[in-house]
Image (tube, rainbow, N blue to C red):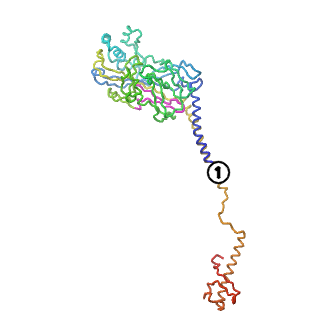
Amino acid sequence: MLFLIAGISLVLSNVFPRLVQSMVKREVVLENGTEAFEAWENPPAPIYMQFYFFNLTNPLEVLDGDRPAVVEIGPYTYREYRPMEQVSFNDNGTKVTAVNTKTYIFQRDMSRGPESDLIRTVNIPALTVMEQFKDSSLEANLISSYMRAADEGLFTTRTVGELLWGYEDALLKALKTFKPDLDDVFGLFYKTNASNDGEYLFFTGQQNYKDFARVDTWNGQSSLDWWTSDECNMINGTNGASFHPVITKSEALYMFTSDLCRSLYALYEKDVTVKGLAGYRFVPPSEVFANMTVNPANAGFCVPAGNCLGSGLLNVSPCKQGAPIIMSSPHFYQADEKYVKDVFGMAPKKELHETTIDINPLTGIILQAAKRLQVNVYVEKIPTFSQTGNVRTVVLPVVYLNESVIIDDVSVVKLRTIAVEQNVVVNIPFMLIGLGIILGGVFMFLMCRLKVPEVNSLPLPEDWDGLIVRTKRSLLWRWNSMKAVGASCRDHSECGTKYCSASGAEAGAWRNRDRCSSLDLHGGPDPRSVGL
């Protein structure tokens, strides 16, 4: 009985978790009225974007060929709002179209200083123009002359707000006279505030739970065209804001990020707990940004083809209008040591500069996440432009961002309820095992109490009592007879004294038919020796 209960319970222990997972898979779908859709459309958890700038402290020395020295200044914190807008369902509800509008509101109380703080850094518009015209001596001379007259150089000093959201650049404005389509405003995140990065077509997860929020097309394209291989041009995974339910430790989480103009993936690192909720931490491995010599699959990110940077860096100039922008992790974390040593002030640390995603494995809800990226500029000496002086070739950091989120308290309560219900359902088989053991023990105890003990013995004769009485009488009679024989032998020697001992204690078995016919004696034990 116990084995039967245990067997059934073990079978159910596999069935019940799958039952819970099946229920979650049906609920987590992008469909009007579901909690998953509401959270996807308007994320309830507060999102913050923090910017840390690298202020260049030795610009003149850098022009003379010295190593750049920078000081990190920040954070400058913004509250980020990112609702899905222009939502439209397609293909019988299996796909949904939307744009992800992002708005940033400055949080002075969470910032090092105001947006008016000044930062000295590389002059990205000027460097971009110089790179584009460096092989044309005539145009290079004209541009260089204008830069000297306008006091434009390789480095510039701007406010935090200008560097982030844009400012009118004198050189770009002058060039616009010859190129009317040229935008004369530059900013690292120009046109990204209160704007979107394009139209997405997502899978809803209705047909397959693993397709939940997966990107089908971006701006009408199912693949990219910036890179030199089909694999590198693939659009994989979600947009990084949502993930499918029932996540395992063995899978890779793919995501497409327009900031990097590419797809990437994250792998399981360890179990974590966020606000009392259990989760899995996923991080992008170093292979994601590794050089092609380490990861041959990254050869397609070398632009132009064969022109590869070291590990940990990504040249995104093809998707940034030709600007010499290089992306990396903050402080060149996981990059070649060369880049760390080239700039004084770099101090990469895993806990501060790694991108992490903590996910509830059952629901796929993000418990906590931090996307950390650094914007760098590729700086080199350009002979046709005196403004570059004798600068050494270096990847110069400008700013790094930390886009972070942690689950809100209302969602925590909902997830805890789900976790409790899951634990109850999953533990039902083990409760049955325990109940079976208790009932089995009670049953065995009652059986032992009611069982009649059996006596293991040989079968007794039917007239056992009569046999005992007759045996006692026979033994007494023989004992008395032996005593009589002893006395007779002493008084009557003619009765065969040669068969009797002098004391008469030992009486042989004898019979004298002629002279002692009245005596019929047989030896036997002393009846006293048998307790009679």
Q: Residue reaching furthest top?
A: 177
Query: From the viewer's perspective, is residue 7 above or below residue 383?
Result: below
Q: Quadrant of residue 171?
A: top left
Left or right for 488, reference 372: right
Q: Is residue 108 visible?
A: no
Left or right for 304, reference 422: left
Q: Is residue 287 magenta?
A: no
Q: Position of residue 289 (x, y in %)?
A: 40, 27
Q: Quadrant of residue 528?
A: bottom right
Q: In the image shown, does 476 or 193 lie closer to the viewer? A: 476
Q: Which residue has dot 1 on it? A: 443
Image: magenta residue range: 350-373
Q: In the image shown, does 237 or 353 lie closer to the viewer? A: 237
Left or right for 191, reference 412: left
Q: Is residue 359 magenta?
A: yes
User: Number of numbered discs present?
Assistant: 1
Q: Residue at x 46, y 27 (%)?
A: 404
Q: Residue reaching furthest front?
A: 514
